[in-house]
Image (cartoon, grey):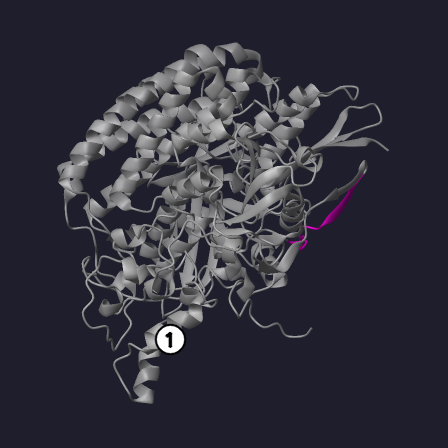
Amino acid sequence: MGKMIQIQPVTRIEGHSRVVVELDDGGNVSDARFHVFALRGFEMFCQGRPVEEMPRIVNRICGICPWNHHLASVKATDAVFGVTPPPAAVKLRRLAQHMAYIPDKLLHFYFLAAPDFVLGPDCDPSTRNVIGIAKANPELARKVVRMRQSAAMMLEEWLGKVIHPVAAVTGGFSRPLLEKEREKFLEGYKEQLEFAKFTIAFAREEVFPKYTEAVESLGVIKTGFIGTVTEDGTHDIYDGKLRLMKPDGSYDDFSYEQYTDHIGEHIEAWTYPKMPFAKKWASGEFSLDLDEPKGIYRSNALARINVCDKIGTPEAQKELDLFREKYGRPTQLTLLYHWARLIELVNNCETVIQLLEDPEITSREIRSDVQVKAGRGVGCVEAPRGTLIHDYTADENGLISSVNLIVGTTHNQAPINMSVKKAAQDLIHGGEYDQGVLNRIEMAIRAYDP
Amino acid sequence: MADEKLRVAMFWGAACGGCDVALLDIHEHILDVIEVADIIFWPCAMDFKFKDVEAMPDEHLDLTFYNGAIRNSENEHIAKLLRQKSKLMAAFGSCSHMGGIPGLGNFHDRKSIFETAYLNTKSTHNPDKVFPRTEFEVPEGKLTLPEIYDTVKTLNQTVPVDYFIPGCPPNPEQIWIVIQAVASGKLPPKGSTVGASDKALCDECPRKKTELKFKQFKRRHLVHPDPEVCFMEQGIVCLGAATRAGCGWRCIQSNMPCRGCYGPLPNARDQGAKMLTAIASHIDSEDPEEVERILDTLPDPAGYFYRFGLPLSLLHRRQRRNA
């Protein structure tokens, strides 16, 4: 009989989970798992709700990324009722989507991930957090808090409720952008862009070079990737087609409605979330085997950066070029999620500025008329944590009869398990480990920002 | 208290993480908080583990903010553990206060939730009908998962709660007011709702009200509501009459009606019943058949009136048939 090491709860991530590392008689890792405890039952209790209420219910799937669920959902409701929002409403939704990414990226990089890199993976766990960062570097901490506040406040000033938003409505948007808000925000987001450029340069030059060995090994596995791109293959977080890339870099592109042809969800008895897999690969088989995984793909920033051919804004494209020059495409290095996230942060700031400079953004034509009817609609956007797929079917009264949800980190359940096992196998030998080793296993999880 | 810092914990049950972000959204005040308080358990932001909490003496924590509903045995176990370790326990946010959105699960039970999630959804591939289990044997021993309960409970239905902070999530400005009250020792009597008003949202709403009478409900997405006029006067269901104020009417400001996340008014335990009474008094008809026809224009009344509060309500859950 071997031994089991437990890490619980896994910390500096969203949600409830435990890592269990199973050791054999020699103290080497025979298996390791990432168990997730939550099941709230959205696919059940959304049934019977009016379709148009869904964007105000399913945003509660995730309070870190409620905007993305809100927007994926409203797109699904448009599709159910067969309505096309006016162009200005689409721009406002896109603006909200990019605006909402910015505080999220700052939160993850500085508050959740940075303690491992700035203070070090082995430091005293009681100080390994954002307060530790604030004590070690008060000036930077103050700046981060101020920039995150500014980003969150602009969204709030425009749209009121920012955690569990209400502003997107079937057929369009509930509130226009006023000219005085446009002018004020433009100044604010120019400052955000400067800070984003500072952040990625800081990470690229001062943080990651210290951890080259960890970047090249920690939790590294071989998988495919999923993300959204426009018709010409440009990175896009609001709209486009889904691209599912194999580990060798070849890919299939498909429309939202076709997702069931490409993605299945596998169930393991030891964790509550399902494990999505690419069902056209490996004859439809599923395996978490590290040497020969089957059907496994990843989502979130690194996946999007891998699947896109290019990025639509100049500063972010420069960063993508630097990244690809160093790591190629696709790269499998798990810790590079942190870097990919910051490339997107630059793109978010640039895109917000582009949208605010678009004269149509202050248009008052932001709602199309809607008729209630029966139908099915699939709405997708990219959340920071990955592709959101919201699939609703409604009866003739516009009440939900079935819901299928594949969301953000759910796509990453299988690969997180593989990265945990890989990290544990590489780090624990002969039964020897300390808190720094266990924290490194958690770092492999945090890269996915689950 | 003056020379010793407060010891504080923040934990989540069945939740979305939005309450934790709302706490961070007090922004630069978080730097003031760490001057007066040591946060010694907060899983989403810090590396303290369950073993650290288990090792604390009883009542070691001055205050625990518990967000999230009680959906499974882990939520319950940690709620009890933190209650034992805390002098004061506050239900933070709609889910722990009254069940929240996860409380809609009380229209169903574990079996139907499992069958939907693991068998009957479009992309589920489960030929062997595998379901997650609370115990799972591996060569090295036994792996466990918490048990998902049939019924979602509020925190106060699980352990005694000292203070209630409503909202999905609580408004950060209100959170800061509560934290200042804690730091200065100026909390109201135990059992109070804090970080909210005692008035109804309607009483604070800036929209124009003239004569509240209607002959038909209208669904929000089918109309272009006047942003200056009371939603109910426009036939759109708004829970402002049955809901506590204190949120800063941020939904109303975006031209969207209230869905009740701040919970029932003082002395009105059942928010849905209160709302139904409010609606009934404003239907513009005396004819019972016409009243019924008007009520029929409102789809899914249970889903509107108990959007956030089914577990706290007198209904608590859909009645269960004996197996």
Q: Number of marks in the image?
A: 1
User: Is residue A170 placed above or below A329 in the rendered structure?
Assistant: below
Amino acid at circle 1: Thr
Q: Which residue is mark 1?
A: B277
Q: Residue at x 40, y 28 (%)?
A: A106
User: Is residue A391 placed above or below A380 in the rendered structure?
Assistant: below
Q: Is residue B118 magenta?
A: no
User: Is residue A385 placed above or below A206 in the rendered structure?
Assistant: below
- Residue A403: x, y in percent? 47, 57
Depth check, front residue: A293 or A354: A354
Q: Is residue A331 visible?
A: no
Depth check, front residue: A323 or B268: B268
Q: Is residue B3 visible?
A: yes
Chain on which label 1 sits: B
Q: Residues within 10 Å of mark 1 (few under 14, many from 20)?
A: few
Q: Which residues fall within the magenta stretch?
A: B127-138
Q: Secondary structure at mark 1?
A: helix
- Residue B42: x, y in percent? 56, 35
- Residue B58: x, y in percent? 69, 40
